[in-house]
Image (tube, rainbow, N blue to C red):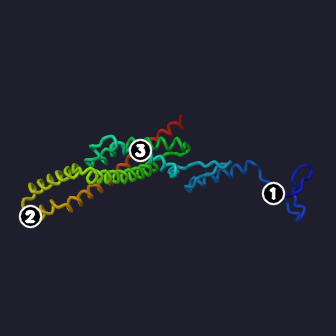
């Protein structure tokens, strides 16, 4: 610490005699501005004076976002709770798919209430929607599997299995109509429980993939809409 001379810091060091450099506040402010601009170009969060972080486009706060998406996933499963026929027919995923655009937009709005400094973009919305679709796909499959098991072995109700067997019989009839020369072993295999179980898993996998893709598209659209709204508010 340099001694004070006439109430001001000394211009020269008392030990070595070297002159002490002084930087004006305008130069410091210009250097801080350049640092913030460089941080934005590098894609890293810029720290404002005082420790406030300015969230950059696409830089989502995932702990907060995941909490929002957990609530959205629970809302997406409401048809399974309110409409038991959908649950027992295995069509919960299709009902959830129709809710995805609304869930994506609502998730984006809820997230921006928690993190209003975030500049939402279509890319950030697509990330949000992809995560939402994935979470909803696994949740829907888990609920369908648990309900099917409880229905079949808890209540000894074969309605879900009977519905799926009817679908497989229709598929077998269509194959017979379009390919009359198909081998008889194919039709015999289509009646086995293993064939039915395999096709059920294939259909569930396809439905999960559809939910993930639909979630990404819904999130992309929601991000674009919210980003346009933010730009409009700034311009106004």
Front residue (pair 109, 91): 91
* Between 142 and 51, the one nearer to me in the picture: 142
Residue 72, percent from left and from top? 42, 45
Left or right of residue 211, residue 116 in this image: right
What distance separates the C-alpha of mark 1 from that of mark 3? 55 Å
- In the image, is 102 to the left or to the right of 90? right
Regarding mark 1 in the picture, which secondary structure is present there? loop
Can you give x and y, in whole percent of width and height, for residue 140 in the image? 34, 50
The residue that disc 2 covers is 184
| Left or right of 145, for residue 64 | right
- Which residue is tagged 1? 21
Name the residue tied to disc 3: 104
Q: Residues within 10 Å of mark 1 (few under 14, many from 20)?
A: few
Q: Which mark is first along the chain, 3 or 1?
A: 1
Residue at far left of view? 181
- How far, Cα to Cα, is label 3 from label 2? 48 Å
- Residue at 31% x, 50% y: name it: 147
SS of the residue at dot 3?
A: helix
Tell me the mark number nearer the camera, choosing from 1 and 2: 2
Q: Nearer the viewer, residue 219 or 13?
A: 219
Q: Nearer the viewer, mark 3 or mark 2?
A: 2
Number of residues whose C-alpha sits closer than 10 Å to that of mark 3, classed few (under 14), some (14–19) or many (20 or more): many
Query: Of all residues shown, which one is farthest toward the top?
Result: 236
């Amino acid at each position: 610490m340099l001694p004070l001379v006439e109430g001001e810091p000394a211009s020269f060091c008392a030990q070595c005699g070297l002159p002490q450099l002084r930087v004006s506040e305008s130069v410091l402010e210009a250097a801080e501005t350049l640092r913030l601009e460089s941080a934005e170009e590098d894609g890293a969060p810029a720290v404002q004076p005082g420790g406030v972080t300015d969230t950059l486009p696409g830089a989502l706060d995932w702990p907060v976002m995941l909490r929002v998406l957990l609530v959205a996933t629970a809302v997406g499963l409401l048809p399974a709770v309110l409409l038991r026929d959908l649950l027992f027919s295995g069509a919960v995923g299709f009902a959830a798919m129709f809710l995805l655009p609304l869930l994506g937009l609502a998730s984006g709005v809820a997230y921006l209430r928690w993190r209003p400094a975030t500049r939402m973009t279509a890319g950030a919305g697509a990330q949000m929607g992809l995560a939402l679709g994935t979470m909803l796909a696994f949740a829907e499959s888990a609920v369908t599997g648990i309900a099917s098991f409880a229905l079949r072995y808890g209540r000894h109700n074969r309605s879900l299995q009977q519905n799926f067997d009817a679908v497989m019989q229709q598929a077998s009839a269509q194959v017979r109509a379009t390919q009359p020369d198909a081998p008889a072993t194919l039709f015999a295999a289509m009646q086995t429980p293993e064939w039915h179980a395999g096709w059920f898993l294939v259909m569930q996998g396809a439905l999960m993939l559809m939910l993930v893709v639909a979630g990404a598209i819904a999130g992309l659209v929601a991000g674009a809409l919210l980003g346009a709204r933010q730009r409009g508010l700034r311009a106004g």
